[in-house]
Amino acid sequence: MSSSPLWQSLLAIMMMVAIGYGSRILGLLIMARIPLSPNICLFIDAMSSSVLIAIITPIIVHGDGGTRFAALMAGAVAIILKSPLASIAVGIICAASWRWWFVT
């Protein structure tokens, strides 16, 4: 009995949605029952930063000059202004400017 690739793909997508949604709900339910001590708050803050760094670092290492320039400028703005929104905006503007001037 062979099922079509379309149904297999849809089943795989539905399973990924269920697992992703379930892990978010379970995470919320578990964390709702854990008292947030200062140590747990520090752990959560450090964990979110380390996940962000783990995602961004390979992009910077394997990226082009525009990627590196945008990351450098966004990091500088984040350190100086301590504003994530400003940092994101500067990163986007720098990446777009680099590609406008050097790629086209």
Image (tube, rainbow, N blue to C red):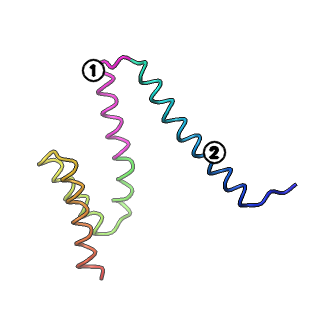
How many numbered marks, from 0 up? 2
User: Height in image: 27 above or below 88?
Assistant: above
Residue at numbered disc 1 = 38
- Image position, residue 26 (x, y; %): 51, 29
User: In the rendered structure, which amino acid carries the disc numbered 2?
Assistant: Met
Pick out the residue farthest to the right.
Answer: 1
Q: Nearer the viewer, mark 1 or mark 2?
A: 2
Q: Residue at x 15, y 47 (%)?
A: 79
Q: Main secondary structure of the magenta part?
A: helix
Please tell me whether mark 1 sits on a helix, a strand or a loop.
helix
Residue at numbered disc 2 = 15
Please tell me whether mark 2 sits on a helix, a strand or a loop.
helix
Q: Is residue 48 magenta?
A: yes
- C-alpha separation, residue under disc 1 versus residue under disc 2: 36 Å
Q: Residue at x 55, y 35 (%)?
A: 22
Quarter of the picture holding the N terminus: bottom right
The disc label shown at residue 73, or none: none
Pick out the residue farthest to the bottom.
Answer: 104
Tell me which segment is drawn in magenta: 35-52
